[in-house]
C-alpha cells in the first residue's frame, strides 16, 4: 500500500460492486474516497464498513464536476479514479506502485480491458 495515493470512486446505487472495488483499491491506496450522488441502497453503508471515506454531492449531469469535487477531499499526492465495476489486476497494482515510486510528476493512463457479452474489448488510455 502507498501512503501517497487516494483511489476515488463515483457512485450511485452500487451495492453489488462497492465492497469489491473498495477492497481492490486498498491494495494500492492509503485512502479510498467514495463520492456518492444519492444512493438509496446500501452503497454508503457498505463502503464505510469496508474502510472507505464517503462524501456526498448531488448528481447534476456533470461527470467532471463530480471528479473535481472529489479533489477537494484528497490529501494525497496521487489520485486514481476507478469506476465501481472496475478492478485492478495484480500487474496493474504493481505498475501503480512502480509509477509512484519514481516520483515523476506526470499523468499516467491505463489501457482498459472490458469483458462483456462473451467478448473482451480493449479501450481507453
Image (cartoon, helix red, strand yellow):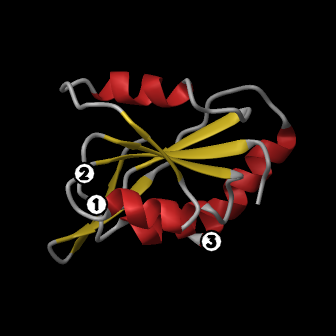
**Circle 1/circle 3 CB separation < 8 Å:** no
N-terminal label among 1 and 3:
1
Quarter of the image with the C terminus in it: top left
Residue neighbourhood size for the residue with mark 3, other residues' Cα within 10 Å, grouped as few (<14), some (14–19), many (≥20): few
Classify residue 95 by image quadrant: bottom right
**Circle 2/circle 1 CB separation < 8 Å:** yes
Q: Nearer the viewer, residue 77 or 116?
A: 77
Q: Measure the alpha-carbon separation of dots 1 and 3.
A: 23 Å
> Dot 1 corresponds to which residue?
14
Secondary structure under tag 3 reads: helix
Left or right placement of residue 78 versus residue 7 in this view? right
Q: Position of residue 86 (x, y in %)?
A: 40, 60
Q: Nearer the viewer, residue 25 or 118?
A: 25
Quarter of the image with the N terminus in it: bottom right
> Dot 2 corresponds to which residue?
39
Q: Is residue 18 visible?
A: yes
Classify residue 112 by image quadrant: bottom left
> Dot 3 corresponds to which residue?
90
Secondary structure under tag 1 reads: loop
Residue neighbourhood size for the residue with mark 2, other residues' Cα within 10 Å, grouped as few (<14), some (14–19), many (≥20): some
Q: Which mark is residue 68?
A: none
Secondary structure under tag 2 reads: loop
N-terminal label among 2 and 3:
2
Amino acid at each position: 500500500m502507498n501512503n501517497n495515493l487516494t483511489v476515488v470512486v463515483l457512485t450511485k446505487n452500487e451495492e453489488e460492486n462497492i465492497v469489491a472495488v473498495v477492497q481492490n483499491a486498498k491494495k494500492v491506496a492509503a485512502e479510498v474516497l467514495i463520492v456518492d450522488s444519492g444512493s438509496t441502497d446500501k452503497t454508503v453503508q457498505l463502503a464505510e464498513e469496508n474502510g472507505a471515506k464517503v462524501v456526498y454531492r448531488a448528481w447534476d449531469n456533470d461527470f467532471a464536476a463530480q471528479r473535481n469535487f472529489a479533489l477537494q477531499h484528497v490529501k494525497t499526492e496521487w489520485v486514481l479514479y476507478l469506476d465501481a465495476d472496475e478492478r485492478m489486476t495484480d500487474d496493474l497494482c504493481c505498475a501503480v506502485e512502480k509509477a509512484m515510486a519514481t516520483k515523476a510528476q506526470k499523468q499516467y493512463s491505463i489501457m482498459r480491458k472490458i469483458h462483456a457479452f462473451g467478448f473482451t474489448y480493449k479501450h481507453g488510455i
